Amino acid sequence: MKTLKYLSGALAFLMIFQIDTATAQTFLNFQLHGSYTDNIFQNYSPVEDYISTWNFTIFHQTKSKTTLYYNGNLNLFSQYSDLQNQNHHIGISKKQSIGDGKNEFYLGGYARFRIDKPVYDIYDNNNVYGFASVKYYLYPTIMFRAKNTLGMRAYVNYTDYSYFENVLSLNISKFFQTRTTLQTGIEYYYKDYTGNQTYSATGPNGLFSRTYIIDSPNVSQLAASINLAQSVSSLTAVQMQYLIRSNLSGENRFAVLDEFYSDEVLFDDHYSYSGQELSMSIKQYMPFQFILIISGDYLEKSYNNRSVYDLEGNELLGKGNRQDYQSSFSSQIEKRFSGQKIPVLKSMDLFINYSYRINHSNDLYYDTSSAFLSAGFEMNF
């Protein structure tokens, strides 16, 4: 019933696409991906699974520079079918030119819903966000961007983790004649939980029962980054980024449950840790419309007030907080068919991707590695 409710709302939203069709454009995108991983739960005890992802997107752009869109995806798992989930995303954005047209102002909002099977309905959440952004050229070769996003995520079946969020980002880009772009940015994140967290504990033989209230109302974080993009030639591009993040106040909520369990969505978003990240990618255009993309990342994560446990779930006193060092590598080949005489091929792209990740952690549950192989196609209409 929940699925029908969300889909009905999405269809009602999309009916406005019929307005002003004489001066508007509609774009459709369909993607189908098949994937294999040798460590579906990303922990010390790897188990494999096969995943298929179906994704559909529709954009509608009016002459007045308003964009309406819907995106839906379905993730199916072969071995662990209870992990199946679907996501629906609907939104609207408005672009307004400022001055000579190079400067622009954006205003919009979106709603997003996630629906899981009953075993994992702890993940179910509803999101409503609004945003405003501006792009302004201070000089012909210097561009300033600012964006503010404000909204709420509500966990349907785990309300202790519902929160309001505000994100402010500022960045400046400098364009050089050497086909180099240098960008620096800063982002401020603020998460405010909607209520106090409570849990109950029962003493031996049920002699007493107590309810505890954890008042952890908010957490704030600051991130700064520098990004360098270089066009080596008309066929080769290189990009590098360094980012550092630090928690300013508060801490993310984390529950130590009777059964050792980690929910990446609830407990391990970027508010959970401070640290630094370094990434690099190379994009190479090849003959016959092939594209090769090679990328690598290195992350250091220092978790805030997250104790270390052994594999039986016992806290290891004196080991400090959880510390992760993560390295990953990815290689992807894409094939485009633009210019083909066969109509169905004109809008088709194919890809195959292999990625490998190693996570070294002082918490042995998270000391692991995983490989991921995926292939699929994309069509635009």
Image (cartoon, rainbow, N blue to C red):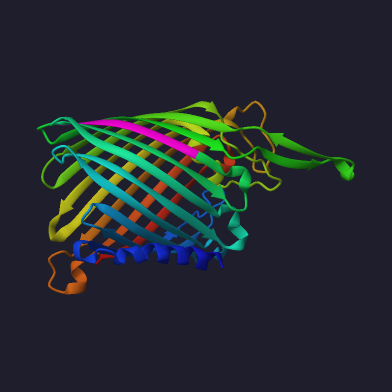
- In the image, residue 173 lies in the stretch drawn in magenta: yes
Q: Residue furthest front?
A: 20
Residue at image x 18%, y 68%? 346
The x and y percentages for residue 208 are: 87, 40
- In the image, residue 260 lies in the stretch drawn in magenta: no
The x and y percentages for residue 259 are: 69, 48
Is 189 on the left or on the right of 147, as rendered? right
Q: What residue span does the magenta drawing correspond to?
A: 165-175
Mark yes or no: residue 347 visible. yes
Residue at image x 13%, y 48%? 235
The x and y percentages for residue 157 are: 62, 53
Viewer-nearest residue: 297 or 196? 196
From the image, which quarter does the C terminus lie in? Answer: bottom left
* Picture quadrant where residue 54 is located: bottom left
From the image, which quarter does the N terminus lie in? Answer: bottom right
Viewer-nearest residue: 132 or 192? 132
Mark yes or no: residue 226 visible. no
